Amino acid sequence: MTTPHDVTDALAAASAPRQRGLLARGLGRSYGDAAQNSGGLVLDMTAFKRVLNLDTVGAEVRVQAGADLDQLTRFLLPHGLWLPVVPGTRQVTVGGAIAADVHGKNHHVAGSFGSHVLEMDLMTADGQVHTLTPQGVDSELFWATVGGMGMTGVILHATVACSHVETAYVVVDTERARDIDDLLARLTTDDDTYHYSVAWFDALATGRALGRAVITRGRGATLDDLPPELAREPLAFGSRSASLTTPALPLGAVNRWTGRAFNELWYRKAPVERRAEVQAIGTFFQPLDAVGDWNRLYGPRGFCQYQFVVPFEAVETFRRAVEVIAGSGHPSCLNVLKRLGPSNPGMLSFPAPGWTLAVDLPVKPGLDRLFAQLDDLVLSAGGRVYLAKDSRLTAATLSSMYPRLQEFRAVRAKVDPAGIFVSDLARRTQL
Amino acid sequence: MIDALGNPQSLLLLGGTSDIALAIAHAYAGRANGLRVVVAARPGPRRDDAVQDLQRAGCVVRAVDLDARLPSSQTAAVDAAAAEGDIDVAVLAYGVLGDNEQAWHDVETGAELAEVNFVGPVTAGIVLADRIRRQGHGVVVALSSVAAERPRRSNFVYGSTKAGFDAFYTGLGEALREHGGHVLVVRPGFVHSKMTQGLKAAPLATTPDRVAAAVVAAVDARKEQVWVPPAMRLVMSTLRHLPRPVFRRLPL
């Protein structure tokens, strides 16, 4: 799609009898079936990507929904501005970032992407364009759209609040935690003094080393933090896209043994403690963007990501979940753990105050049983699983995890009574 | 939808009282909670038993009437299953073995074998293909037989109907590829089941549960053909290449 008129055409085509609905798709980086609509129409939004307006004083940027975070990072930095929230990849459109209400390493202090959207234009199933704001008359539709996985309509434009930055660098402190208790204690003590925080943990270590981790936390670098050679061009964005590529492997490279070796190596290679290291933002925020097609490492059957959050009180459940994963024999290498801050009013928005954990597991027999066991733990603690990463939740589990689902369905029934907007995720889980 | 771990949400069993079809449903029921199953078969006590059996396994079951010799009945069965949501996996399991001597001597018996084993499945395949094209996804498990691979004196009428069946579903798999559909052609050897009751078991005989396990694994791996037991593939490959004077002397 290149103009809003294309959306009107697609809506007309999708409304014909025997059709299977319409779905807007960004860069397709959701881990599951959120951006797929089998048998139906999918609108490729990625050509609709112009920056419409930039207010450098007020730090606001207005863009077409297909604009992506890589493009915006490169566009904003020379103006001393940056996106308020960046996830683990820059290959995300603004529309996708709103639909999944993505979060980043600053969630504990800054919230998720939807919290920084000042205004958006949404075309609903009747072809009407609604200008939505977080507090305006249509705020209900706004907060159904934030985290709504594309089910309320097609986001056309959005205005996003940016942050001022002096440099394109982050000052990073790295430290090792010897086990899960040490990890949680360190994160509880002083996490809020850092603007960015994340921990990688060893998902295969058991016993006394259970949950040993490498914590990396930082803040935006000021001009004074930079060594002279970087200070000459403080806002230069060095990161290139995908400089390494992965060949298509007939069998997955990730198994119990390589997984164990990787986890051991990753833990050992991290310094026990290192303070105030200056890193480029691309390196700090999106290390995987430097490796093209890294997903191929998991072989032809691929992998599933599982990310959940449980409230801070449920720390025992959290510990139990780490134990279950580490003891399962399913190897995970990209294991992320983080403290999340307050949620926003998004009805299906994922982030909630508490501990979140994400693991990538290669698909093999028995993985469904491990996930079912984790679902039970997460549910018992009043937690939830992230929809943008899900590819196997059932309708029943999802509705227990998202208590505001009924409210969301009511909004959807109002703006899209015929159910034109649909995805495979929505079909599978009866959103 | 079939989820990322290969678990379907719905099954359609055409020939739902067949031992193999039920074993496949049980294999999936063990993996997916609240699996929706449509049992299409002739009404009667055998179908009632099948429904109760699957309900006990935690499935949400619905029975619909199916007469393999009536094309309209195939359409009605597929439509009934589709009315409740997408058909994730359809299993084509009905068929008759018949008596070979009677079948090649008597027009009616031979024609019935051809209708039930070939004409009916072709009709069902066309209706299923239409549904799968519209869904953009869907798996068909077609139960062929090793008898389809080379006609034998002792069961060539059955073998010929299965050869047609096998060719049709192999081709349908190619046709549905671009539409997101997938067809698995299953070639079991001798299976201990209601269909073979009273017959002397052949070498490498297998059971419905083993066929089901092989089917589920093959669907997970998106295979297009599977032999049960796997050794049957090599055996049949050898038999297919034997010169006819030798083949005819074998005690098969």
Image (cartoon, coloured by chain):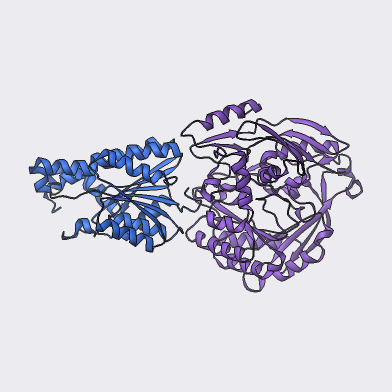
Chain colours: A purple, B blue
Near-viewer residue (A156 or A208): A156
Near-viewer residue (A93 or A5): A5
| Residue at 53% over, 62% down | A372
Residue B38, horizontal then vertical, whole percent: 36, 51
On the rendered structure, is B138 left or right of B168?
right
On the rendered structure, is B113 left or right of A315?
left
- Quadrant in the rendering for residue A397: bottom right
Q: Is residue A333 visible?
A: no
Near-viewer residue (A247 or A292): A292
On the rendered structure, is B61 left or right of A396?
left
Residue A347, horizontal then vertical, whole percent: 67, 50
Residue A338, horizontal then vertical, whole percent: 72, 59
**Please, is residue A46 above or below residue B83 in the view?**
above
**Please, is residue A311 above or below residue B184 in the view?**
below
**Please, is residue B107 above or below residue A204 in the view?**
above
**Please, is residue B188 above or below residue A184 in the view?**
above
Q: Residue furthest left?
A: B105
| Residue at 25% over, 49% down | B146
- Quadrant in the rendering for residue A262: bottom right
- Quadrant in the rendering for residue A83: top right
| Residue at 70% over, 32% down | A49
Near-viewer residue (A148 or A189): A148
Q: Residue furthest right?
A: A224
On the rendered structure, is B227 left or right of A50?
left
